[in-house]
């Protein structure tokens, strides 16, 4: 999950529903005899961005408790090692759940120091149900097509309409994938990773997981502690809140980031002309949201679409200049075109988004119990909205199918672990998607782990995105297993300063720049293989570990987040 942060809060209600207990695998427990895994056949699938990329497919059991039964197909990518020293496979995952990981292999191989990357086979994969893995889920194509009902309900009828949309989505998933949904969950995906390990012929794996990928990695380590060599977990899901409580926590965290964004706009009143008082700027944003109820911008951007457009600003502040420009143009000049363009760039859903959302709901609804009484959702959401109005209702509707999910819930495994090598945990203090508390919680659960903190860091996904201090810790760990240790037995083992906030962009954009950026966006989408919304949305960085080439006044900060964050999966 990609929470939105600050303080984690209790759900305030017992989670009801049918529960299937899924205990962690104890040491020495017998497992079903695995089906033989043939060696992988790698073929060239290079792109302009990733010229060394190779692709393969792999069969895995749909039900790992029935290894001789029905199989599914997993889609993999690889950037092979080139050094004489070979440290084994480095599996990478961008999160979600529902994020495609195929392009992430190319980014990680290009962004790591060349000497380190050369010693690993960097392996990307689309988890079960995702992207080019088969079957790929798409429960209800066009579920997010504009203009959908406004997120914040004004009365019982508007709420009823939204509840029925959520119920319809859950029903469509159940009718379309009744035979698959019981096996779309984190534990099954973690077991797929071990099938990948076997197909690679590796006794142990190395792993780099972002966002939800941290939880996936922790579950794998719990299931197979003896098969973990090195594991780096960046922007950590709080395992104590899977998943209802973590999503409530995000409401407060993203609201805090939205307020920080409004304060940033206020500091640059000479550019955006929206006032110097952050509260007044924020009030103008909510007036804009209200106005879009009756007159969606460009016929496409209503209140829900506006929230989708600005939500990426909570993941990475590199988006702020372009979002502020669209905001200012609408408020000051009545110009809806930049707002529509921002939605099309950052918020609009496509087929890949539909797939990502289908897997997201399938995993989260199956992984853990959710309230089955809508009255619980209503109370908790209004209580949170009273203090955090930015995206609370949007988030509630995003997850609402879990109130009606056709498959019973499992019990999340305990991911506490004292049987694995030192794990490197990396976390920004102001991360909205996976709040700081999650990094601390997992650090405490993984004995011998090392916690590296980006002090004041405001973004989600902090390594290989431009912070040389954080990247240095990751590189040292992958090179020879080194982790920092606190000298005073403190909880935090190392601290890195945050990247600077972006500089503003002029509101007026020359036509030539618009054309150039449109071309860049199209190229990014092709190389990533999915939309910003489905992947997790945040700007793109040049594919090396060196300084990114700025595109404009704010380009240094924006481009530093780009490639990585376009590939990260959102946990809503």
Image: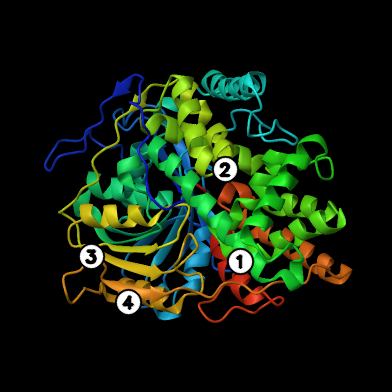
On residue 476, the disc is 4
On residue 389, the disc is 2
Q: Are marks 2 and 3 in contact (CB under 8 Å)?
A: no
**Above or below, comparing residue 226 to residue 378 in the picture:** below
The residue at 67%/51% (across/down) is: 283
Q: Are marks 3 and 4 in contact (CB under 8 Å)?
A: no
Q: Nearer the viewer, residue 33 or 332?
A: 332
SS category of the residue bearing label 2: loop
379 with respect to 270 (left or right): left
Using the numbered discs, state the Cα–Cα distance from disc 1 to disc 2 in whole angstroms.
23 Å
SS category of the residue bearing label 1: helix
Using the numbered discs, state the Cα–Cα distance from disc 1 to disc 3 in whole angstroms.
30 Å
Q: Position of residue 44 (x, y in %)?
A: 56, 60
Q: Position of residue 398 (x, y in %)?
A: 56, 35
493 with respect to 502 (left or right): left
The answer to whether residue 129 is seen in the rendering is no
The residue at 59%/70% (across/down) is: 541
Q: Earlier in the sequence, mark 2 or mark 4?
A: 2
């Amino acid at each position: 999950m990609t929470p939105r942060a600050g303080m984690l809060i209790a759900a305030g209600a017992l989670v009801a529903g049918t529960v299937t207990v899924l205990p962690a695998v104890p040491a020495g427990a017998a497992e079903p005899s695995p089906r033989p895994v043939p060696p992988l056949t790698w073929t060239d699938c290079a792109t302009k961005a990733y010229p060394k990329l190779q692709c393969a497919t792999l069969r895995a059991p749909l039900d790992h408790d029935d290894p001789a039964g029905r199989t599914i197909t997993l889609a993999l990518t690889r950037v092979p090692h080139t050094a004489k020293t070979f440290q084994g496979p480095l599996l990478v995952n961008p999160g979600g759940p529902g994020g495609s990981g195929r392009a992430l292999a190319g980014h990680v191989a290009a962004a790591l120091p060349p000497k380190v990357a050369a010693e690993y086979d960097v392996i990307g994969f689309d988890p079960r149900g995702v992207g080019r893995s088969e079957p790929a889920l798409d429960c209800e194509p066009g579920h997010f097509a504009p203009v959908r009902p406004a997120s914040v309900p004004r009365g019982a009828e508007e709420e009823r309409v939204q509840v029925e949309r959520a119920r319809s989505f859950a029903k469509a998933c159940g009718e379309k994938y009744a035979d698959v949904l019981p096996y779309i969950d984190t534990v099954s995906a973690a077991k797929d990773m071990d099938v990948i390990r076997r197909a690679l012929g590796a006794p142990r794996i190395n792993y780099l997981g972002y966002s939800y990928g941290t939880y996936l990695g922790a579950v794998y380590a719990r299931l197979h502690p003896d098969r973990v060599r090195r594991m780096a977990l960046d922007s950590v899901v709080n395992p104590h809140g899977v998943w209802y409580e973590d999503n409530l926590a995000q409401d407060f965290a993203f609201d805090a980031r939205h307020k920080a964004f409004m304060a940033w706009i206020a500091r640059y009143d000479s550019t955006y002309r929206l006032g110097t008082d952050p509260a007044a700027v924020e009030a103008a944003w909510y007036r804009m949201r209200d106005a879009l109820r009756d007159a969606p911008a460009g016929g496409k951007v209503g209140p829900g679409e506006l929230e989708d457009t600005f939500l990426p600003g909570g993941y990475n502040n590199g988006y702020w200049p372009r979002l502020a420009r669209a905001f200012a143009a609408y408020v000051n000049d009545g110009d809806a075109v930049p707002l529509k363009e921002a939605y099309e760039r950052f918020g609009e859903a496509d087929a890949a988004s539909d797939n990502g959302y289908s897997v997201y709901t399938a995993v989260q609804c199956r992984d853990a119990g959710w309230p089955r009484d809508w009255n619980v959702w209503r109370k908790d959401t209004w209580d949170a909205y009273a203090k955090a109005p930015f995206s609370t209702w949007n988030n509630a509707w995003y997850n609402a199918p879990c109130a009606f999910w056709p498959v019973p819930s499992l019990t999340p495994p305990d991911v506490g672990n004292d049987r694995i090598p030192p794990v490197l945990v990396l976390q920004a203090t102001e991360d909205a998607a996976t709040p700081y508390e999650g990094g601390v919680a997992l650090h405490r659960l993984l004995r011998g782990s090392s916690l590296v903190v980006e002090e004041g860091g405001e973004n989600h996904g902090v390594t290989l995105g431009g912070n040389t201090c954080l990247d240095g810790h990751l590189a040292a760990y992958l090179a020879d297993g080194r982790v920092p240790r606190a000298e005073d037995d403190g909880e935090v083992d190392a601290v890195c300063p945050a990247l600077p906030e972006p500089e503003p962009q002029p509101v007026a954009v020359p036509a030539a720049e618009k054309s150039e950026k449109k071309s860049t966006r199209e190229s990014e989408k092709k190389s990533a293989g999915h939309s910003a919304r489905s992947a997790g949305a945040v700007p793109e960085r040049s594919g090396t570990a060196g300084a990114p080439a700025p595109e404009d006044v704010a380009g240094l900060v924006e481009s530093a987040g780009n490639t990585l964050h376009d590939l990260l999966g959102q946990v809503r």
